[in-house]
Image (spheres, rainbow, N blue to C red):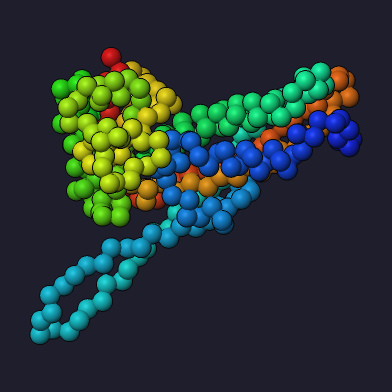
Amino acid sequence: MSETTDTFTTSYGAFIPEVWSQKLNTMLEKDCVMLQCVNRNYEGEIKNQGDKVKIITPAEVSISTLGSSNITYDALEPTATSLVIDQKKFFAFKIDDVAQVQANTDIMEAHLKNAKKAIEEVQDSYLLAQQAYASAENIVGSEDSPIVLNKTTIYEQFVNLALCLKNSDAVSADKRPWVVINPKIESYLLQSTEFINAHNVADETLREGAIGRIAGMDVLVSTNLTAVDNKFYVLAGTNDAITFASQLAKIESLRDKDSFSDLVRGLYLYGAKTVQPKALAKMIVSAA
């Protein structure tokens, strides 16, 4: 079907592109599970598809004992990596004029919510796939011997997961870890006596959307943590591990010359990089 860039002529004022863009950007800042678990330190520097920024990670500094010999200086070699905006997604649909006349604002809000949900699903799945870059020392279970969870074993295994992050020096007073699970694992967790429900976490601040805490980790639930080859990859870490940048690049309205409809389309760009693999851990869990 062809399109035209003629002036937007209908009276459906709710579909002003600038209004859509502002509202959808605001909505995308709120509920996405994995956005609670990443940092966005470089977002101001990356806005367009294909953009990239060099991220410098400082080298470790060694400590020596002062003796009679001269002081020697280590040649520090910081590592460099690039965060690239390489994910390009779009949505496109048309709105019939009859529907527009009946409920302008309601239709706009409904489609905004559906666009938000669709974006969050692909974005969450993309960020959860960063489990592949967790440090080898921070893996509980294996591909050949995945962990079998139930209500009696779940606490012990999550303690092992949290221990990986602590042994990697990823956790500190200002770097509280998180863990993302799916509804199936949540069902085991809710039967564990060691799980602290959100309403029982007194005088402490949980991440938005967290259901509680286990082994010192804020627990978030995502339906996008799906089985791969009959295994789940439970992801844990601190916000230092993954850096993320995104941009709702454009929303525009076009008049469809072949029907009494308006065409609406939007372009969403994003990218992520695991910059501190030691601040990321995963548990390989049997889905059986």
Residue extending furthest left?
Answer: 68
* Residue in front for this viewpoint, 267 or 59: 267
Confirm whether residue 77 shows in the render.
yes
Q: Which quadrant is home to the C terminus?
A: top left
* Residue in front for this viewpoint, 56 or 252: 252
Residue at horizontal 13 percent and vertical 79 percent from the top: 66
Residue at horizontal 26 percent and vertical 39 percent from the top: 201
Is residue 285 shown left or right of residue 163? Answer: right
Is residue 76 shown left or right of residue 244? Answer: left
* Residue in front for this viewpoint, 93 or 271: 93
Residue at horizontal 32 percent and vertical 20 percent from the top: 184
Image position, residue 259 (x, y; %): 86, 19
Residue at horizontal 65 percent and vertical 30 percent from the top: 109
Image position, residue 71 (x, y; %): 20, 81
Confirm whether residue 135 shows in the render.
no
Image position, residue 159 (x, y; %): 18, 36
Q: Which quadrant is home to the N terminus?
A: top right
Examine the image and state in which quarter residue 217 appears: top left
Image position, residue 43 (x, y; %): 54, 52
Q: How many marks?
A: 0
Is residue 220 shown left or right of residue 261? Answer: left
Residue extending furthest top?
Answer: 288
Q: Is residue 151 above or below residue 30?
A: above
